[in-house]
Amino acid sequence: MLNLHRPNLVKIKNILLRQQKQVAEQLKSIEKEDPVTASNLVPEASESGTESWLAEAHGKFTTLKKDLISLSGGITKSLAKLKRGTYGKCEKCGKEIEAARLEAMPTANFCLACSKKSPK
């Protein structure tokens, strides 16, 4: 496992758990706010521009939802790595991910060097 001190690992785990909770709350909120899934927010069909407004709003909510689901997956993956003792190992080169990088971005899967090499 990464050469982070135990207090730093506990700090990272707490950050991940807090982020996981926030993402779950945001996903619930999106479900309520999306005009297509939240029937009480749908404007009357006879209003001008309703269909295009619904499509645009739903598209934005769908994109945000996908991003949050992806983030949730990264958080879950990082928490599982912490539990297994494999957290902090670069998935590309196998070297340790820099401690400062993990503290800034706890879901990082690559060291800084590999991250810069990888195509976006």
Image: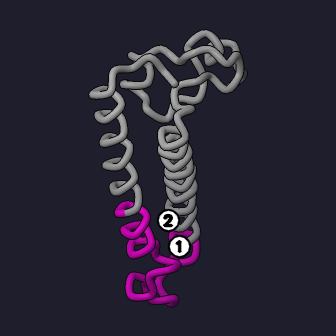
Tell me which corner region of the image, top left, top right, bottom left or bottom right, holds residue 58: bottom right
Disc 2 + disc 1, Cβ < 8 Å: yes
Residue 10 location in percent, x, y? 31, 35
Residue 62 location in percent, x, y? 56, 62
Tell me the residue that label 2 is attached to.
Answer: 57
Query: Quick one: 84 or 119, which is closer to the camera?
Result: 84
Residue 94 location in percent, x, y? 67, 19
In the figure, is residue 2 to the left or right of 59? left
Q: Is residue 56 above or below residue 70?
A: below
Q: In the image, is residue 48 part of the stretch drawn in magenta?
A: yes
Q: Residue at x 49, y 35 (%)?
A: 107
Q: Residue at x 31, y 26 (%)?
A: 8
Tell me which corner region of the image, top left, top right, bottom left or bottom right, holds residue 90: top right
**Magenta stretch in the rendered image:** 25-54
Q: Is residue 17 above or below residue 56?
A: above
Q: Residue at x 37, y 60 (%)?
A: 26
Residue 6 location in percent, x, y? 32, 27
Q: Amino acid at mark 1?
A: Leu
In the figure, is residue 116 to the left or right of 106? right
Q: Is residue 117 above or below residue 23?
A: above
Q: Residue at x 51, y 40 (%)?
A: 78
In the figure, is residue 55 to the left or right of 28? right
Q: Report the quarter where the C terminus lies.
A: top right
Distance of mark 2 from mark 1, alpha carbons?
Answer: 5 Å
Circle 2 packing at 10 Å, graded few (<14), some (14-19), many (20+), is some
Q: Secondary structure at mark 2?
A: helix
Q: Secondary structure at mark 1?
A: helix
User: Residue 54, labelled with which disc?
Assistant: 1
Q: Amino acid at mark 2?
A: Ala
Q: What is the image's colouring?
A: one colour
Query: Residue lying farthest top?
Result: 113
Tell me which corner region of the image, top left, top right, bottom left or bottom right, holds residue 15: top left
